[in-house]
Structure formats: C-alpha cells, structure tokens
Image: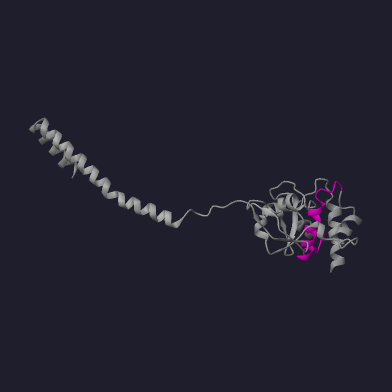
Amino acid sequence: MSTEEISTAEIGAEEAGPESTASRRTVLRAGVAAAAVGAAPLATGRNEAVAEAGPADTRTGPARVALKINGKVHEPELEPRVTLLDALRERIGLTGTKKGCDRGECGACTVLVDGRRIKSCLTLAVMQQGREITTVEGLAHGERLHPVQAAFVGNDALQCGFCTPGQMMSAIGCIDEGHTGSDAEIREWMSGNLCRCSCYPNIVAAVRQAARELR
C-alpha cells in the first residue's frame, strides 16, 4: 500500500470516528506481522547455507616448516609471519646472520637462496621451503676457509665485524653474477651492504682477490 493510500485511509478513518481509527491500526499491524513471517524462511535458508558451509579456515598458529640450510634440513615450528632472519637466529640458532636495520637497508642479514643473494629480513621463512639456503656458517669446509672468507681476512676487510657475514654472502653473489669487472663495478653491486666502520676500500680489494681465485 502506498503512502498516499495509507494517508487517505487514515483521513477517512479519522472522519469515521475512534472505532474506525482503531480498526485501521489493527490492519496495519497485521500487515507488518505478515511481512515479517514471509521473510523468515529466507533468513533461515541463508543461515542453514552458512551452517552447511562450515566456518572459514582461519588457522594462523605455528606449523612445522622444513628448511634446508647449509645442506641440513631443519623443521622448526613457525608462525606464518616469522621472517627467515628470525627463524635462522631465534629458532634454529644460526646467529652468524646478523639483524641490523630489520627493513632491508643495511644488508647485514644477507644469505644465499638457491645461489641468489637475498636479505633474509624481507622474506618469510615459509616461503623458502624446498630451497637451498646458505648462511655464513656453511661457507668453510672444516678448517679450510672459503676463498671469500680468506680474502676478507687477508685484506683486513673488517673492523667491528658486525656487517662481515652479510658482506661475505653478498660478495659471493656478486662474484657469481659476474659483477667484478672493475673496482667501480664491485662498489656498485656491493652497495646494498653498509659498513659502519667504512672498510669499503678493503672490502673491494677482498672481493677483487676472491673473484680472481674463483674464476
């Protein structure tokens, strides 16, 4: 019934007297009740459909994650939000990889994943399942240092040593990528790794020497 029809009916009811007005109100209440009853089956049907579908899978708790690191498989229980850096340091105990800025700016957390250098603070551990992860602990063979490690020591390419693990891992990536044609090229492709002690000339010399030995 339209607003105009209701208004006209109400005016007619008022002219007819109190008894007609009461009857009109009764009819309107009955109409509203009938509409509510008609809509109830639709709402019930929707609720039944949701109940049959079941609750959405919102599990975000810890789960076992298989990470192959330095040739050995580790299976820590990790939450999906845990970064590779935190998994290495806090859950697996490989503290050679350093946490500097924790936002991908300093390069102290650099590791190799399938031979490619990445900043482990910017990737989730669960994303690296099934890949070969190499940290600074995996470079030496017993007492024999990796050529990059030996070159850093020989060229005194460190002072406090905090950035050194990331510098070494990035140096290996830089050499493997073939970006050691000149000192300028080495500086450019190592620029993602910061040294607060400013050992850059010695770092460049170490990368240059290691590149010659690894060719």
Q: Residue furthest bottom?
A: 215
Q: Is residue 138 above or below residue 37?
A: below
Q: Residue at x 42, y 57 (%)?
A: 52
Q: Looking at this view, is 31 or 131 the one in front?
A: 31
5 left or right, relative to 38: left
In what quadrant of the picture does the C terminus appear?
bottom right
Q: Is residue 16 above or below residue 169?
A: above
Q: Residue furthest left?
A: 16
Name the spot of residue 169 as percent of width and height, x first: 79, 58
* Figure quadrant of residue 53: bottom left
Residues rendered magenta in the picture: 159-184
Would residue 87 be counted in the magenta stretch? no
In what quadrant of the picture does the N terminus appear?
top left
Q: Looking at this view, is 21 or 101 the one in front?
A: 21
130 left or right, relative to 215: left
Name the spot of residue 165 as percent of width and height, x first: 81, 53
* Figure quadrant of residue 182: bottom right
Name the spot of residue 208 as percent of width and height, x first: 85, 61
Q: What is the basis of the colouring in this image?
A: one colour
Name the spot of residue 181 as percent of width and height, x first: 80, 64
Would residue 167 be counted in the magenta stretch? yes
Q: Residue at x 42, y 54 (%)?
A: 50
